[in-house]
């Protein structure tokens, strides 16, 4: 009798653990729902990539516009286009990066855009239309996630912004806001299928 009871208990535990297991598809559904909820909560106006290009690759911040980039699945707002010029093909530059990062699924935050935090540094190389980037090892992103690799979602803005130095008090360095799906995020995002929200500024070191 006791043996039979333990068999029943074991089966129930097994069924419970199976019910707790989420498939990758279910996690992706949750991610999409989290992004939709965030967009609604923040009053974001999503525009198409074609509308974005028709306006000269700009987003209207007064309307809180974000463009949805079809190939990347990234939502982007260009808050400031930035000083100077875009990174040129064949060029390798070191950029200062200040950021605010928030996991949309659980609201955990990471940032270096307020004192006393130091900025991160990334080295970006452009070859034709392709960009590659890595963090220097004294960066907060590297210290937190243990990788020098820059997620592709954070590289996406480079084809649309300038990355010069601040020259006066009248202009702005490049600044963007991003919603990055797990497939274009760092290892934690990929592992848990979590989307992340970013506010990032970029400028050259010299």
Image (cartoon, grey):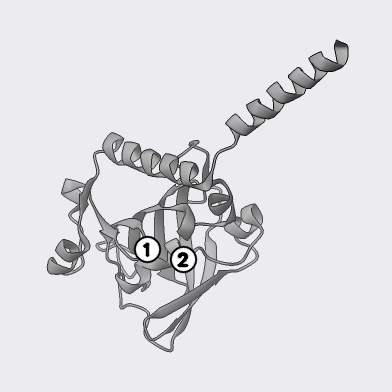
- Toward the top, the furthest residue is 1
* Residues at discs 2 and 1 in contact (Cβ within 8 Å): yes
Label 2 belongs to which residue?
152
Name the mark nearer the viewer: 2 or 1. 1
- Which residue is drawn at the image coordinates 58% and 57% (left, top)? 141
Dividing the image into 4 quarters, which one contains the N terminus?
top right
Can you see residue 62? yes
* Residue 192 vs residue 144, the one in the foreground: 192
Q: Quadrant of residue 77?
A: bottom left
The secondary element bearing badge 2 is classed as: helix
- Which residue is drawn at the image coordinates 53% and 51% (left, top)? 189
* Residue 192 vs residue 174, the one in the foreground: 192
Horizontal and vertical percent for residue 101? 47, 48
Label 1 belongs to which residue?
72
* Residue 107 vs residue 136, the one in the foreground: 107
- Toward the right, the furthest residue is 2
Q: Dot 2 surroundings within 10 Å: few (below 14), some, or many (20 or more)?
A: some
Q: Is residue 34 left or right of residue 116?
A: left
Q: Quadrant of residue 204?
A: bottom left
Can you see residue 102? no
Q: Is residue 64 above or below residue 54?
A: above
Sequence-first tag of 2 and 1:
1
Dividing the image into 4 quarters, which one contains the C terminus?
bottom left
């Amino acid at each position: 009798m006791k043996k039979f009871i333990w068999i029943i208990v074991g089966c129930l535990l097994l069924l419970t653990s199976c019910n707790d297991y989420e498939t990758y598809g279910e996690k992706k559904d949750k991610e999409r729902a989290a992004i939709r909820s965030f967009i609604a909560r923040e009053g974001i106006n999503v525009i198409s990539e074609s509308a974005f290009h028709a306006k000269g690759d700009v987003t209207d911040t007064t309307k809180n516009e974000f463009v949805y980039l079809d190939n990347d699945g990234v939502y982007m707002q260009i808050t400031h286009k930035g000083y100077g010029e875009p990174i040129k093909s064949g060029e390798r530059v070191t950029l200062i990066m200040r950021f605010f990062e928030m996991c949309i699924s659980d609201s955990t935050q990471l940032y270096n855009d307020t004192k006393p935090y130091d900025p991160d540094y990334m080295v970006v190389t452009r070859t034709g239309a392709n960009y590659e980037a890595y963090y220097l090892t004294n960066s907060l992103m590297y210290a937190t996630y243990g990788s020098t690799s820059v997620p592709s979602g954070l590289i996406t803005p480079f084809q649309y912004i300038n990355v010069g130095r601040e020259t006066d008090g009248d202009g702005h360095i490049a600044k963007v806001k991003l919603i990055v799906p797990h497939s274009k995020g760092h290892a934690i995002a990929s592992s848990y299928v979590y989307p992340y929200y970013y506010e990032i500024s970029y400028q050259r070191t010299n």
